[in-house]
Image (tube, rainbow, N blue to C red):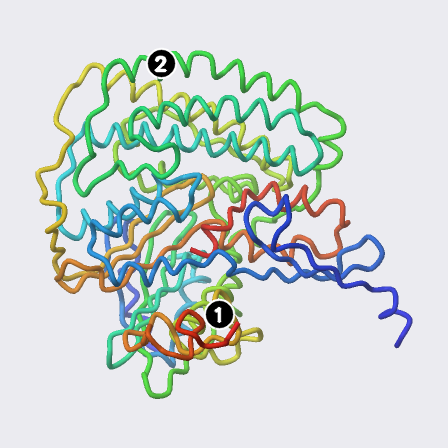
Amino acid sequence: MTNQESTRMKINIGPQHPSTHGVLRLVLELDGEIIKSCEPIIGYLHRGMEKMAENRTYLQYLPTVDRIDYLGGFFNAYAFCDAVESLAQIEVSERTQYIRVLTMEMNRLSSHLLWLGTFMLDMGATSPLFYTFRDREEILSLFEELTGQRMMYNYYTFGGLRHDVTNVWLEKITDFIKKMPRKIQDYENIITDNPIFVTRTENIGIISKHAALQYSITGPNLRASGIEVDYRKQNPYLVYNELDFDIPSAENGDSFDRYTLRIAEMYECLKIISQCVAWLIENPGEVVSSVKQPLLKVPEGEFISNVEAPRGVCSCYVKSDGTGTPYRAKWRTGSYYAVQILPKLLENSFYPDLMAIFGSLDVILPEVDR
Amino acid sequence: MNFDIFENIGEAANTFSKIQIDSNELVEALSYLKNNAEFSLDRLNTIIAVDLNDKFELIYDLHSVETGKVARISVLVDRNSPHISSVVNVFKSANFDECEIYDMFGIVFDKNPDLKRLLMPSSWIGYPLRKDYVQSDERLAWNGGDND
């Protein structure tokens, strides 16, 4: 055994580890405290989502897609509905579109809140978790009131929604978004200038512009690297082009920038939500689709829908052979590619930085394994 | 290869069309589309594999960060000898995609340095997303087989 080999240590993290956000296994090679190589091993949460599509009708498959990213179920459901609606040329009413935007942005907010809490927890700060879960709980309660479910909503249908929102529910949303900016401000007061947090995240885990594109990084992680790409602006879907909001961006691409960017996105979510609520109160209408859901036959063809989900671009490919069952469904999710860049990010970084880097990427494993 | 077929390539992301090319020209075509400033399709969104019963189809979904335009390049792979060249030298993100397609369809990507089963256990029998995959195979774990 040579000298170099004897000082190196192989260490296995996971699959069950409190801060891997699911079941990710990392095999690290350490030289003292420096990570020399990292191999992510995935597949522990593989449920065969794509195979399931081939054995079910469109309606039977619809509730399962919420489980691909269990913190952003609306985004997956919308991606699938959009693909099917485009193939079958089903019209979607404007009110439906506004409610979809409203629920998705609420969902993005709850997803970012959970990320913020767990990211802080990864780095040893326990209190923020309780604060963010308190706020997230309010969103989940509102969703429960609307859909009957806290996380797996099954609320969208092909061409519409299960049922309409009530004005009472919209007023509750208004109350909620009134107090939210102050709470986000509170988090910023605790975290943004905290010297411990700043030293642990600044200049850590830098993703360059070039690397971000090479590894197909999308969503907040890409925007933190200085590339201002948001599919809500660039390829507007639903009614996003009628709404007024900004795309926050940062430039360094380190863990700290990924944090500030998600905080800025939360404010933008609130902006969009309040515009949607105002529109929905003014414009009543029909949201339940006349499409016969269980008998839906989709004409032959193929389509890819792209949705800007909280963790990057979520694409859903559907190929139909003219029957009531998808011929093939394929999911592309943001976290999958964020896991792939880990070996490059972790190389030659300190072991204690592992969680400051991995946590900032907002990876969620059910979305990786599908 | 003749690059004229790419003349009008690039469309809005909410439409779907694809351009069929020969599998030998894949790497050349992708690096042309990526490096040519006219298209700058610099992000490989994903690779989609479809089992067409007599052959496989691979769809390379290219996106341009600058313009938001997309292009889909389709190649066909022979079912009896499913080999195609890897594109990891053009897009690093292709590695996981190619491993997953190898895992699910058994398509071998030549020159991929790290081709392995990604989601299924390495001892898994068969390729699950092929249309002729038999879920009642007695060698599989849930049917009493002993693979881990």
> Is B107 rendered above or below residue B13?
below
Q: What amino acid is labelled 2 in the image? A: Thr
Mark 1 falls within which chain? B
Q: Position of residue A123 (x, y in %)?
A: 69, 36
Q: Is mark 1 on a helix, strand or loop?
A: helix
Q: Could you tell me which chain the residue with mark 2 belongs to?
A: A
* Residue sitting nearer the eye, B86 or B53: B53
Q: Is residue B117 left or right of residue A158?
A: right
Residue A343 drawn at (x, y percent): 64, 58
Q: Which is more toward the observer, A75 or A162?
A: A162
For the N terminus of chain A, the image quarter is bottom right
Q: Which residue is drawn at 80% across and 63% down?
A: A9
Q: Percent x, y for residue A264? A: 52, 27
Residue placed under numbered mark 2 in the picture: A174
Residue at 22 percent across and 15 percent down: it is A281
Whether residue A261 is situated above or below residue A58 in the rendered picture: above
A313 in relation to B53, above or below: above
Quarter of the picture holding the C terminus of chain A: bottom left
Residue annotated with mark 1: B99
